[in-house]
Amino acid sequence: METGTCSRDELKKMFLQRLEHLIHISAPSRRERFVPFFIVLAGKTEDPRYGESLNIVRYFLQNAMLFTKGDEDFYRTLQSVLTRDERGNPCRWERSIQDYLKVVYDLR
């Protein structure tokens, strides 16, 4: 995915659209991978899974491997959103936490 020289808001909008598309086209077994990132980027603080999603994004930011400019843009966009909201609770994740690290491959 080419991100060029987009502003932070343009990147956020682009990633939200891409995540929403992946949620709609993916099989249920893969769909869950994208939901936490969508919840956090969309700022859905009223969502019951918001705290869990923040924890997943935090884990992603600590462990993701970034290979492309698009990966880095996604990382920085998430990081800017996360620094605005540091909530999060211990929780049980729906999937293996390592599965959430694969989201950058799907966004490409």
Image (cartoon, rainbow, N blue to C red):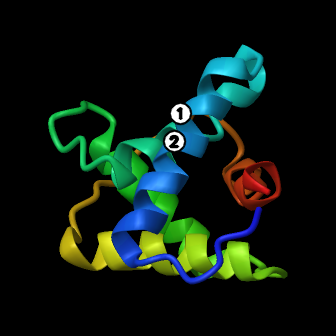
Q: Which mark is residue 17?
A: 2
| Residue most extreme to the left | 46
Q: Compared to 104, does 97 lie above or below? A: above
Q: Is residue 54 left or right of residue 21?
A: left
- Identity of the residue drawn at 56% across and 83% down: 5
Residue 93 in view (yes/no) = no
Image x and y of residue 85, in percent: 20, 68
**The one of 5 and 38 positioned closer to us in this rendering:** 5
Instruction: Tell me whether circle 2 and circle 1 mark residues in contact (CB < 8 Å).
Output: yes
SS for tag 2?
helix
In this view, 13 is above or below 81: above
Q: Position of residue 53 (x, y in %)?
A: 41, 48
Q: Which quadrant does the N terminus fall into?
A: bottom right
Q: What's the residue type where badge 1 is placed?
A: Glu
Place residue 70 in its image quadrant: bottom right
Crowdedness near tag 1: few (<14), some (14–19) or many (≥20) residues, C-alpha within 10 Å: some
| Within-10-Å neighbours for mark 2: few <14, some 14–19, many 20+ | few
